[in-house]
Amino acid sequence: MDVQRIILIAALAIISYMLVLQWNQDYGVKTEPVAQAESVSAYKSVTEPVVVNEESDLPLSTNTVAPESSDLPEAKAVSATNQQQLIKVKTDVLQLLIDTKGGDIIEVALVDYKAALDNDQPFILLEQNGGRTYVSQSGLIGKDGPDANPE
């Protein structure tokens, strides 16, 4: 009986070792060969002294014109157009705010679950405001966007 037990334990050990070897071959960490710095480097050696010029080789700019205020976009106009592109969806569980440009979900709130016990504000999962930006981006931007069919 002892001989059979020893043979079975040895066979189990060999199979386990072969299993570990095969697993390492399939899923092990693959290291990419690193090129030697001497053969690839096109730069000077680090041991050579570096000469620093106090004078710059770049020409100085002679234009000191301030940008005109008419060239700058107005922030109020952008925020007003963003308000017109939002769709509000309310279900029995969720309250969503979807941006029509891109199909991004800007705000998600759970209607049945309150943020705190003493107020009636719904629990907010996703929101976009000055302090936090948590949105679900879909990537839908148009006919030739990333969602377009390759046909």
Image: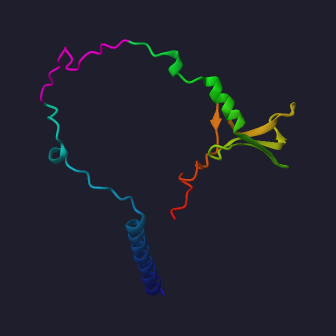
Given the current orientation, which residue lies at the most extreme left position?
Answer: 48
Locate residue 63 relative to residue 36 in the image: left or right.
right
Residue at image position (61%, 24%) is 75
Instruction: Work out whether 56 lies above or below 36.
Output: above
Q: Is residue 63 magenta?
A: yes
Asked whether residue 131 appears in the rendered view, the answer is no
Q: Is residue 129 magenta?
A: no
Image coords of residue 57 (percent x, y): 19, 20
Image coords of residue 37 (percent x, y): 19, 44
Instruction: Work out whether 52 lies above or below 45.
Output: above
Locate residue 34 relative to residue 92 in the image: left or right.
left
Image coords of residue 80 (percent x, y): 68, 29
Q: How many marks?
A: 0
Q: Quadrant of residue 117?
A: top right
Locate residue 151 relative to residue 6 in the image: left or right.
right
Q: How is the image coloured?
A: rainbow
Residue at image position (64%, 39%) is 134
Q: Quadrant of residue 63?
A: top left
Instruction: Work out whether 139 lies above or below 11.
Output: above
Residue at image position (55%, 61%) is 149
Comparing 126 with 115, the one in front is 126
Q: Is most of the magenta stretch helix, strand or loop? A: loop
Comparing 29 with 148, the one in front is 148
Residue at image position (17%, 32%) is 46
Asked whether residue 67 appears in the rendered view, the answer is yes
Given the current orientation, which residue lies at the most extreme front position?
Answer: 70
Instruction: Work out whether 71 lies above or below 117.
Output: above
Residues in magenta?
A: 48-64
